[in-house]
Amino acid sequence: MKLKELAEHLGLSQTTVSRALNGYPEVKESTRLMVQETAARLGYRPNASARRLATGRAGAIGFVLRGSEEFGPHTTEFLAGLSGRLAEEEVDILLTNVDSYQEELAAYRRAAASKKVDAFILHSPKLRDERAELLHDINIPYILHGRTEIGRPHAWLDIDNQGAMERATSHLIDLGHRRIALINGVRGRTFAEHREAGFRAALAARGLPVDPALMANAIFTDEVAFRLAQTMLELKPRPTAFLAGSMMTALGIFRAIRQAGFELGKDVSIIAHDDVFPYLNADNMFPAMSTTRSSIRAAGVRIAELILQLLDGKPAGAIHELWPVDLVLRQSSGPPR
Amino acid sequence: MKLKELAEHLGLSQTTVSRALNGYPEVKESTRLMVQETAARLGYRPNASARRLATGRAGAIGFVLRGSEEFGPHTTEFLAGLSGRLAEEEVDILLTNVDSYQEELAAYRRAAASKKVDAFILHSPKLRDERAELLHDINIPYILHGRTEIGRPHAWLDIDNQGAMERATSHLIDLGHRRIALINGVRGRTFAEHREAGFRAALAARGLPVDPALMANAIFTDEVAFRLAQTMLELKPRPTAFLAGSMMTALGIFRAIRQAGFELGKDVSIIAHDDVFPYLNADNMFPAMSTTRSSIRAAGVRIAELILQLLDGKPAGAIHELWPVDLVLRQSSGPPR
DNA sequence: CAAAAAATTGAAATCGCTTTGAATAACGCC
DNA sequence: GGCGTTATTCAAAGCGATTTCAATTTTTTG
């Protein structure tokens, strides 16, 4: 069923039918209703490619994944929020997987040149993100989940990682901890750097030293965290508290603490960052986990809204939101013995 | 940069340029090279919408998520494999999120009618899957990850859930367990039903009774599993072994066992199904987890290949693969005390 | 009631590519 | 050298929508 056939069936021109379906004002109300009713009854749907070609809009936004290991729980949650909101506007998400940095830049260029997407979403940016610079140069709208410093205005949404970490660290210090370990995300990512900054700021405010042996940067898996925590627990004096970059990290630390024969929340405390995964609930861990909490899914929803605004013509420089982060104290954090 | 401009720049017709770029034989080798080199140099890429309109192929396959809670680790891993392989062929993945059953069927109809995708991938099918029937009726290619019984030939790839569960259960019985609990996936899904069948078959083969109190169906989250396991551990006599439908489920059971004061792998054994998540390694859990193992990511890769075959004209009825499942024994399973 | 204005409809151009059918160029053979 | 083949190239016709511009009808107004 194509437009032409629908028009013939209705005894109208394609022009009028197209207008009626797209809600243009210059079509009589009665015909509009008639057209819409008939189209719905016959199950007519405009051919997406034809419409895209004619309008010049792709009706899709791009999301590039760097290596499939990035396709983890964080990305998933974020995408869930994003795609839910975009679907309401009939905007598609175009997923692209790349294995190397070369490929990644090429992927942006390709998608842009072939007009497959109207805009991109960049996630986990670095402090100075080349991808953002590239998109700026080839003049394609984009929004960052996170922040970067490229000296040009751009749209972004980020959570207050620095503030969150500063509060969590201060809290541990208040409880009496003096040897606090930080198992952070990979070096170079803005969120990880911001968290480290918050960590250092809190220590500095109390005049506590920064021990490099108690700081690590790694991907967020329980396995890696397990090993790192194990090593740190063998130090003398050992850390009495851990700050974990993610819930997966926290699971690994949990395991290391137990295996070393320490009691969680008593001998060793943990505060982890919780992106609110529906299948991994901090409240239901044992012991319940103290967290800095911010729903990454909610961020996805909001970014969808912001990108729609961007495509509606709102200037990129006018789009930015910094979300505060909750500090939720539960049983995994307490005073040291 | 569009085809017309490129053609003018080259002093050739659009026809020839198009053919040269798409590798048609009726263009002189020297011109082909010249055209390809120039196109690459100028960064020309055909407009995707235009090409799709002209060829009638969408260059994308559809993947519908039922409710965002389905957007979990399993889906993620699968998609990672799928999209990696499809990207090599420049085929996109179109993700759609739906919240209700109504919406879901509508989503298939919409995507099909608007020609946004060439084929669909169905996952977690039910024993008799209406989605498959719908796609069959509207005559759109599709492949199932899993199996269903709709009385018509269709393409599928599945793992041997029944066999895996039967072996795992038999092994526990061999170790001496008599009270074995099964925390399975949601009722109605083929994979969950197959696993239950395997479980029952193993028990029946030894003449052991099936205790409904030791069987549960639920989503794969540690929280839910924790509660279910907790309840079961209060039974008298309590189960001495658990079979877990997923690693998340296993984490919840771990927690319940520890909280109840039992020792893992000694007082209570676990064998879990492991879909091989890179961030949750059975080998590195404490104690290391015994599993039935099959990489869901590898399945995604393979399904990508199968769907390409399907689009190439291979009959759906000729496409099906049943993968065997490894049984990997580690420390979480042992003889009962 | 005629003229002007507003509302409604339609024919045809357009988006950027692929592909058909025709035209031209190059080649092989006697 | 002439002619039938074969190899290359091109002009133009789609693909299925949107949109411009013009035409027609209806309504308003003097």
Image: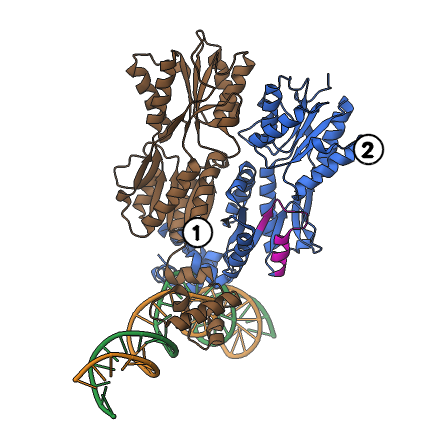
Chain colours: A blue, B brown, C orange, D green
Looking at the picture, do discs 2 and 1 lie on one chain?
no
Identify the amino acid type marked 1.
Glu
Residue at mark 2 to residue at mark 1: CA–CA distance: 52 Å
Asked if one can make out residue A189 in the rendered structure from this viewpoint, the answer is: yes
Tell which of B330 and A176 is nearer to you: B330
Q: Quarter of the image holding residue A198?
A: top right
Q: Are marks 2 and 1 in contact (CB under 8 Å)?
A: no
What residue does disc 2 label?
A: A205
* Residue drawn where x is 68% and y is 49% of the image: A148
Residue A37 locus on image (x, y percent): 41, 52
- Vertical comparison of A211 with C7: above or below: above
- Vertical comparison of A245 with B170: above or below: below
Disc 1: host chain? B
Asked if one can make out residue A159 in the rendered structure from this viewpoint, the answer is: no
Residue B21 locus on image (x, y percent): 42, 66
What residue does disc 1 label?
A: B88
Q: Quadrant of the C terminus of chain B?
A: top left
Q: Secondary structure at mark 2?
A: helix
- Vertical comparison of A81 with B183: above or below: below
Look at the image and give the residue range highlighted in magenta: A121-137
Identify the amino acid type marked 2.
Ala
Q: Left or right of B22: which side holds A108?
A: right
